[in-house]
Amino acid sequence: MTDVIDGVLHTLFRSDQGGHEQVVLCQDRASGLKAVIALHSTALGPALGGTRFYPYASEEEAVADALNLARGMSYKNAMAGLDHGGGKAVIIGDPDRDKTEKLLLAYGRFVASLGGRYVTACDVGTYVADMDVVARECRWTTGRSPENGGAGDSSVLTAFGVYQGMRACAQHQWGDPSLRDRKVGVAGVGKVGRLLVDHLREEGAEVVVTDVRPDAVQRVLDAHPKGVTAVADTDALIRTEGLDVYAPCALGGALNDETVPVLTAKVVCGAANNQLAHPGVEKDLADRGILYAPDYVVNAGGVIQVADELHGFDFERCKKKAAKIFDTTLAIFARAKDDGIPPAAAADRIAEQRMQEAAARRGW
């Protein structure tokens, strides 16, 4: 146990992945709630990030995920031009088995106890209906239903933003933003991946999909009887002959020492968070001539939507902001070329500069 605690403290206070302002461990025995709320930075404003409900193998794994996700949200919000810092919460458990109204209300009370330093929303394992419950105990809740004053499902603009990022990749890589007749592989066709397929097919792209849930794949095939095919798993997808774009839209770590060497695609642009399994993968991609669109840049449509909810949601206003992901992605590629670094490092530099300038203005 001492080694575990030392490992967590090292991540928080001494590692490059640390620098978090606050980490809250939450427990409510009556409901069975075990949760971690991590605030990485509030330099730009209140930390904003979703609530993940997931059956982690251990509490230590949950803490590590919360820390990584919170840090990623700081960069995502900075690159999206939002006046929000980065935070994330994880609830430990199987959402299909453990999620109850009592548990969500208890979670809402913990978020409320932070007094607005953290604004929560949906993530993997949580949905609009869940945020409606959380909001009964916490005013700092977004991603609620329209009936309860919210913006509804943020996956709509997340998918739209990824699509805009993919168009920017095509412009940079092939000199034309059109994805017509390009072959795009989408790994994970849940909430966001399914909507991304809709955008791609509307433009005339050829799409190959996979998902661990056969029903999710079948739903996409039923919606698109032409132009969409399925493969057994991600391992088969990344090896698909003639693939132009690979879009990881499931959980993180999709780009690693095993997958990058066998990727057939020349572009990676997807909705999943934390796609790079470890520092250095971005260089491996660059060495292979594979253009990588930083995940936290292109998947920012959802956070743009939930942030707008705090000020009276307007879908068209949000869609215009999400459309700017096209220009932001191109600017990152230009910065990467000028600085001689991979796009992921260029995006980090731009985000860090914005956070540092905000902290300096506040005298931090």
Image (cartoon, helix red, strand yellow):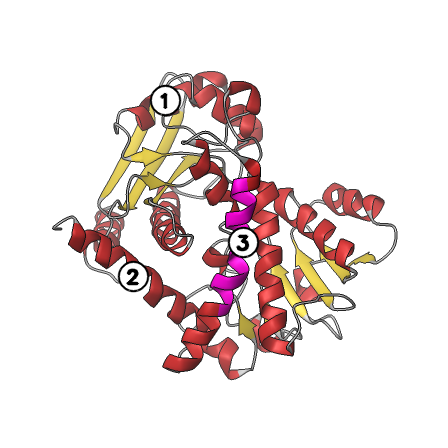
Q: Which mark is first along the chain, 1 or 2? A: 1
Q: Position of residue 88 (x, y in %)?
A: 37, 41
Q: Main secondary structure of the magenta part?
A: helix
Asked whether the viewer can see residue 294, the reply is no
Q: Position of residue 326 (x, y in %)?
A: 55, 61
Q: Is residue 204 above or below residue 161?
A: below
Q: Is residue 71 left or right of residue 154?
A: left
Q: Is residue 88 above or below residue 244?
A: above
- Residues in magenta? 317-330
Q: Position of residue 269 (x, y in %)?
A: 58, 63
The amino acid sitting under disc 3 is Ala
Q: Which mark is first along the chain, 1 or 3? A: 1
Classed neighbour count for the residue bearing mark 2: other residues with Cα under 10 Å, few (<14), some (14–19), many (≥20):
some
The residue under label 3 is: 272
The amino acid sitting under disc 1 is Cys
The kind of secondary structure element at disc 3 is: loop
Q: Residue at x 60, y 53 (%)?
A: 249
